[in-house]
Amino acid sequence: MAGGALYPLDQIVRTEPEWLGVWRQRLALKCAMAAVRLAGRIEDETALRDAWLLRRPGDDPGPSGQILSAWKRLASRSTALDVKSLEAVADLLGIRWDDALASLPDTFDDLRLGGAAAPLAAAGVIARTVSVRADAEMLGWWLADLLLADKLRWPVPVPLMMSQRFSPAFRSEANRGRIRPGEEEFDRAVCLALVQAAAEASRLAADIARRAERLAVVTPKLRAKGAGDAIRLLLSEDAVSGTLQTARLSRFASRRLFERLQQLDAVRELSGRPTFRIYGL
């Protein structure tokens, strides 16, 4: 069932539409929101975007912004894994590194090369992570999407699993609370969660494809010299600051450009504010 649900996503990944980047990054934001909740924090979608986009270059985006950074990194990297790269991710997630976590790349390789189906391998790496360090569950969900992509031979992961951490799929049928990694029903719950995640990702892809098509229609009408820089970012990132500045686009020109794109119904303003605006498909 989970394997069949992943087929539409596989088609999207292999077709490589021009909006593939923004799709992955918006899914990364969705996963980050669930991860922030797991960490006991309260930042929502708007707060996470603000932490990432409104900081000055080089500034620390804060604990929740770092969590978002981990999922943004997942959505733009290969599936290769080693101790050094995993330690860097654990640091972003606020998880203390130790020798127990250093064993996870070997576990990842064992599951990657094993014969288990992709969803069951993903469930396995979550359970293994929690078994070695109960406070590292978030890292297990990050690894699950990395392993899923490797199993499906996707060159870059599609963030899916973490977004379902609090979904009904993990509610115990016996009304005993939530199903935890390693428990008897966990593998089945992961498969059900993956079906739901794939359906939501498919709907998001259809929405983004429609918006990208509209953007392509209006692009020839744009007169700003640096418009191409903004268009490329809109197609590759979840959101773009309304005061974007590039070598060919000033902050003033950028503001005018996004206002024009909004008038043409090619982008949405995502913050709901009259100042410090943020735009995206």
Image: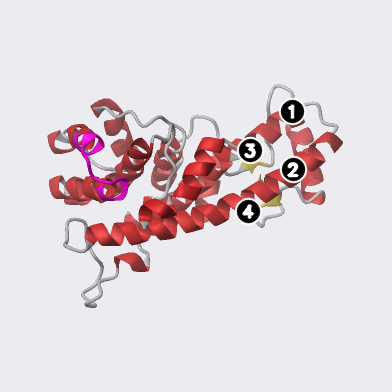
Q: CA distance from mark 2 to mark 1?
A: 18 Å
Q: Quadrant of residue 145?
A: top left
- Which secondary structure, mark 2? helix
Tell me if mark 4 has few (under 14), some (14-19) or many (20+) residues whose alpha carbon lies within 10 angstroms of its own.
Answer: few
Which three-letter amino acid code belongs to the residue tagged 1? Answer: Leu
Left or right of 54 on screen, residue 118? left
Crowd band around label 1 with a 10 angstrom C-alpha radius: few (<14), some (14–19), many (20+): many
Are discs 3 and 2 less than 8 Å apart at CB? Answer: yes
Q: Earlier in the sequence, mark 2 or mark 4?
A: 4
Q: Which residue occupies 44% across, 34% down? A: 156
Q: Which residues are magenta?
A: 110-120
Residue 234 at x, y percent in the picture: 65, 39
Q: Nearer the viewer, residue 187 or 254?
A: 187
Query: Is 128 on the left or on the right of 9, as rendered?
Result: left
Tag 4 residue: 207
Q: Would you say residue 115 sits in the magenta stretch?
A: yes
Q: Give the amino acid at mark 4.
A: Asp
- Residue extending farthest bottom: 175
**Cα gap from disc 3 to disc 2, whole angstroms:** 9 Å
Residue in view at x 63 percent, y 49 percent = 208
Q: Identify the residue position indicated by label 3 in the image.
A: 235
Residue hosting label 1: 249
Q: Position of residue 258 (x, y in %)?
A: 75, 42
Crowd band around label 3 with a 10 angstrom C-alpha radius: few (<14), some (14–19), many (20+): many
Mark 2 or mark 1: which comes first in sequence? 2
Q: Earlier in the sequence, mark 1 or mark 4?
A: 4
Verify whether residue 276 appears in magenta. Answer: no
Q: Main secondary structure of the magenta part?
A: helix
The residue pinned by badge 2 equals: 215
